Image (spheres, rainbow, N blue to C red):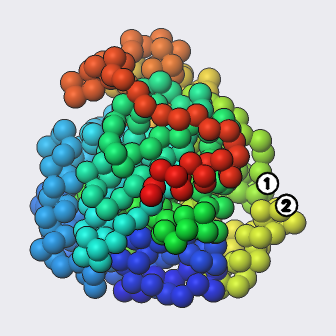
Amino acid sequence: MRYISTRGEAPSLGFADVLLTGLASDGGLYVPDSLPVFSQDEMLAMANMSYAELAHKVILPFVEEDISSAELKVMVDETYAGFSHHAVAPLVQLDQNEWVLELFHGPTLAFKDFALQLLGRLMDHVLGKRNKKLVIMGATSGDTGSAAIEGCRHSEHVQLFILHPHERVSEVQRRQMTTLMGDNIHNIAVTGNFDDCQQMVKQSFADQAFLHGGQLGAVNSINWARIMAQIVYYFYAGAALGAPYRQVSFSVPTGNFGDIYAGYIAMQMGLPVKQLVVATNANDILHRCISANHYVKHNLIKTLSPSMDIMVSSNFERLLFDLYDRNGAELAELVADLNVGKADRLATERWHKAREIFASHKVDDELTCEVIKQVAEQHNYLLDPHSAIGVEAGRACNQHPEVPMITLATAHPVKFPDAVLRAGQNAPQLPRHLSDLLERPEQYDVLPNDLAAVQEFIAEHSR
Ligand SMILES: *Cc1c(COP(=O)(O)O)cnc(C)c1O
């Protein structure tokens, strides 16, 4: 399988290079040039597989030119053995046709562990074979950082630099990053917002001269390998609820459009998906785009669901690429125009294509808390604020009540006590492996919202 850039100018690459590269040299994102499609029989067999077996089945076609079946098996077995629930991604039923897919049983209690625990192993494996070192730079609005650090802290070949917006992540989120010590781990708090951090990462990829010959790798969801690992749980949930003979719908709390894009890929790979619901908080550019074909950046709003406080969703470009019939030149022009405000909508027929698959809904903080309260009282189940947005959006957009609606529960409620308390619920307890988190020593550097300062720090600490 080859991977091509959404902007059509960068060379096509194999999996190992895509894994280590992140963003393409033309500023685009890598996507597979074609997708494997599973037959009905293959999907039927999925219902009897463990999570790790299914992960092996789904991921192998994407990596097999660089990683053998046996090598992949070791990596997925190790990755998902580290999850605290034997089902890895258990499904919980709230109501007749309403389900929650719990994706927070990994070491850092958010769905990002599914991809990043594997990514660290994949990268170390490929780098080891090539006898190379990699500097990884990532921006986080909270959960990516700790998941990336957990995923890479035993990687011998990786130096990891994680930028987070200073004082804009929850205390638990910050401590999950800053209490993990290691010679190859560097936490940087930038005095700006998440988009500032993400912008710095993008600019650093575009011009890597500051590394004096070093190579930069990505752990953000611009990295295809993250999307790839997330496709698995869509099949897992679908097969458990009756696919291929029964359709399923998903509601996905969305920030960078990575997680829901994985659902869209699962659909292209044969999973019978009826609806994909884009669930946003007040930072609603995707909702405005999908519901009204209005794509204009607003200022960032700080919400109770900080992992979705994102102004521009980088992975949306991957969907646009398909909507524009994979015409890289046309897409590059559109993205440039959207970025500077020269365009504010998609061509009408392209937008209609998106509407055939996606619905969307926006949920503000007040309603988020109401949903947490309502679900706690009526179903005796505690949602985190991101997952609550997903549940509410799934209800609001559900056009097919006969089809199961599965909300991806992206984080454990213990990570977001503010919202839980505001919803009138007791703050949940940290799980045992994190019970002393608030007492552990922290290590991080605060840097100004200034690209040169951050790059200098990285150059100095990656030698
Ligand atoms: C990262 C994150 C999201 C958003 O996921 P994307 O892939 O960026 O759309 C939602 N909820 C939680 C808890 C997250 O950590």
**Residue at image coords 19%, 38%:** 84
Is 326 placed left or right of 97 in the picture? right
Structural crowding at the residue carrying mark 2, measured as other residues with C-alpha within 10 Å and reported as few (<14), some (14–19) or many (≥20): few
- Give the percent coordinates (x, y) of residue 261: 49, 62
The one of 133 and 86 positioned closer to us in this rendering? 133
Q: Give the position of the N terminus as an image quadrant.
A: bottom left
- Kindly identify the amino acid type of the residue bearing the numbered disc 1: Val
Q: Residue placed farthest to the right in the image?
A: 342
Q: Give the position of the C terminus as an image quadrant.
A: bottom left
Residue 281 in sight in this render: no
Of circles 1 and 2, which is in front? 2
- Give the percent coordinates (x, y) of residue 337: 81, 69
Residue to which mark 1 is pinned: 296
The one of 153 and 286 positioned closer to us in this rendering? 153
Against 377, residue 461 (above or below) is below
Circle on res. 341: 2
**Residue at image coords 54%, 31%:** 169
**Residue at image coords 28%, 56%:** 155
Which image quadrant is residue 150 in? top left
Against 369, residue 23 (above or below) is below
Marks 1 and 2: CB-CB under 8 Å? Answer: yes
- Give the percent coordinates (x, y) of residue 118: 28, 58
Element type where label 1 sits in the image: loop
